Image (cartoon, grey):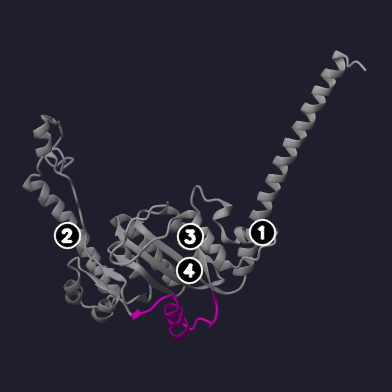
Amino acid sequence: MTTTADELIDRRQLRKKVSFWRVLTFIVAAIAMIAMLMFAARDEIFSASNDDHIARIKITGVITNDEPMLKLLEKVKEEERIKAVVLHISSPGGSTVGGEAMYEAVRELSEAKPTVTSVGTLAASAGYMIASATDHIVARRSSIVGSIGVLFQYADASELLDKVGVKVNSVKSSPLKAEPSPFNTASPEAVAMIDRVIKDSYEWFVDLVTERRDMTRLEVLAVADGSIFTGNQAVKNGLIDELGGQDVAVKWLETEKDIQEDLKVIEYKPKRPGDSIFSNPAALTYLARQFGIELDASDAKEIEGALRERLFLDGLVSIWQSSR
């Protein structure tokens, strides 16, 4: 039987149509699956938070002017079902502006509902500033807290430039404009200017700790020389209130703030650009169920953490880990 040219053309067109519908069906199925995951994850979160509960918010890493975190704190403040908040802080500090913004947001939150800090590895400098905004501070015996002070650093590459024969010229409106500069040794006037800025911020930091920790100014000045302290030392010098972890923090809320016992502690995270549904433990739990795998919340959180970042080694000394 001979196939005509018209029949060949019809067959090719039919194949193209079938391929097109197959691809379209796959795309629609993928979109439907993603939508199911999103709704399932949302429903699981809402079902968990429909009852009264305690919110847990992690503040980790270098403190910056973190708008997503500030929005989250505002949202938590307004949520009626959240009866108290545990801040888990593990931060070496950061910018004074970021610390100030976070401190003020936590203070507003604390006026609306009880707050307590549970220090992880460390809460130093701006990290400690934020911790002091809560009603109570709990830290592990070996946690690091303190480092009350302000730092300004700048490079002086003038000798290096002289050695390589590079000279940087500048024209400016006044001698202190853009000083100190890495291209020349700082003048005494420039150093004095920075010193005034540092002292102003330092005085503000000391006043803040004096007010929040119910200590005299002399008591705060005695520990505000930039020193860090273990949790054990910090209990004795008044920088924290109690030794322990999250369970101790929650117990304090129950006994001192009349928070109902056995409330669930639910973690809240700021929504950041690039977040996907697969970074949501509830979505991972739902997806696992579709394949007949029972995954509880703690397992899902471990998987989510492993997907997002490498194991973090805490303590006084950390070592670099290779992924291989």
Can residue 21 be seen by looking at this rendering?
A: yes
Disc 3 secondary structure class: helix
Task: Name which residue lies at 56% across and 58% down.
Answer: 280
Q: Earlier in the sequence, mark 2 or mark 4?
A: 4
Q: Sequence order check: which comes first, mark 3 or mark 1?
A: 1
Is label 4 or label 3 in front?
Answer: 4
| Residue that label 2 marks | 199
Provide residue 177's location: percent of width, then percent of height.
16, 40
* Snapshot quadrant of residue 295: bottom right
Q: Measure the C-alpha gap from mark 4 to mark 1.
A: 22 Å
At label 3, counting other C-alpha atoms closer than 10 Å, the crowd grade (few under 14, some 14-19, many 20 or more) is some
Quadrant position of the N terminus in the picture: top right
Instruction: Pick out the residue farthest to the right.
Output: 1
Which residue is at the front of the view, 314 or 257? 314
**Label 1 sits on what residue type?**
Ala
Q: Which residue is mark 3?
A: 72
Q: Residues under labels 2 and 3: Cα distance?
A: 32 Å
Q: CA distance from mark 3 to mark 1?
A: 22 Å
Of badges 2 and 4, nearer the viewer stands: 4
Q: Would you say the residues marked 3 and 1 are in contact, meaning their CB atoms lie under 8 Å apart?
A: no
Q: Tell me residue 261's x, y (percent).
A: 53, 83
Q: Please say if the residues under marks 2 and 4 sit with CB atoms less than 8 Å apart.
A: no
From which residue to which does the magenta span run?
Answer: 242-264
Question: In front of the other: label 3 or label 1?
Answer: 1
Report the residue marked by disc 4. 56
The alpha-carbon separation of the residues under discs 4 and 3 comes to 11 Å
The mark found on residue 40 in the picture is 1
